[in-house]
Image: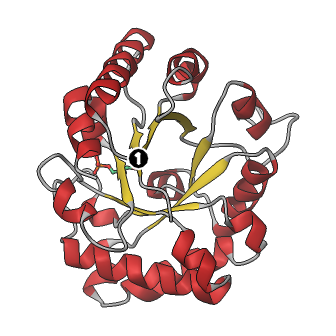
Amino acid sequence: MRKRIVAGNWKMNKTAEEALSLVSEIDNMVKDEVNGDVAVVVAPPFPFLQSLGKLTQGNDKMHLAAQNVSEHESGAYTGEVSAAMLKSVGVEYVIIGHSERRMYHHEDAQTLYQKMKTTLAHGMKPIFCCGEPLEERDADRHFDYVGKQLHDSLSYLSNEEFEQVVIAYEPIWAIGTGRTASSQQAQEMHEYIREQIARMFDAEAAYNTSILYGGSCNPANAQELFSQSDVDGGLIGGASLKSRDFTDVIKSI
Ligand code: 13P
């Protein structure tokens, strides 16, 4: 059965001291309050990965993610961070293709494919993000838009590689806006994504892939979203920056 995952994407927030207290609090709350079978993933900014990795290592339920990775192996790429570096500090998951990176850093489908390849080659699991802008939904083209994002960056992976991939559906109009997708909108897109996986790979891959929902997910709406049959967890932004809120979202699974 596919894994249930709740991942916190901190984006560009927190200082070293704040990061340490947030993860310590989450670690304690997860130990005390979370009984179910769920993988808790935290994705802090790069400078904190190594120190936080030492904390998450002591808790079976907790895992460390990076928010980005270079598509290159190593060399003269000033300011970039490689997959080998991430692996060497205990990173297990890498968020790839977040809409903020597609938008502000012009990451295209080919670059994202290379990022998937290098992440997989170094034994980490990509969390591949997809999701449509508001004008595509309003024009009723959201399925085609997301289908193309999946096809363009994932279809050239082997079945064996794809086994390691987690998908996050994050409609851009729901990110940081307080306007979450309805549970029905999330479910129908997740079902569509699973159908596309079956077409690109096979039915078993579709069944086994964890598909997370992201976009204004919080303690008040998480349970309803997570109760949908094709929603296997969440990728949480704002609500992952407070230990109480994040733990309550985790407990909604
Ligand atoms: P919010 O939960 O703040 O809407 O952010 C979602 C997101 O982009 C997670 O990657």
Above or below, comparing residue 185 to residue 66 in the picture:
below
- Residue 233: which quarter of the image? bottom left
On whether ligand 1 comes within 8 Å of the CB at mark 1, the answer is no
Q: Horizontal placement of 2 versus 74: left or right?
A: left
- Residue 77: which quarter of the image? top right
Q: Residue visible at 25% across and 31% down?
A: 33
- The percent coordinates of residue 36 (x first, y second) are 34, 45
- The percent coordinates of residue 156 (x first, y second) are 76, 76
* Residue at the farthest left position: 220
* Residue at the farthest top position: 17
Q: Horizontal placement of 34 versus 143: left or right?
A: left
| Residue situated in front as seen by the camera: 60 or 62 | 60
Q: Horizontal placement of 94 versus 133: left or right?
A: right
| Residue situated in front as seen by the camera: 149 or 25 | 25
Q: Residue visible at 15% across and 56% down?
A: 221
- The percent coordinates of residue 8 (x first, y second) are 39, 40
Q: Residues within 10 Å of mark 1 (few under 14, many from 20)?
A: some
Q: Is residue 238 visible?
A: yes
- The percent coordinates of residue 30 (x first, y second) are 33, 29
Amino acid carrying mark 1 in the image: Val
- Kindly identify which residue carries mark 1: 38
Above or below, comparing residue 211 to residue 135 in the picture:
above
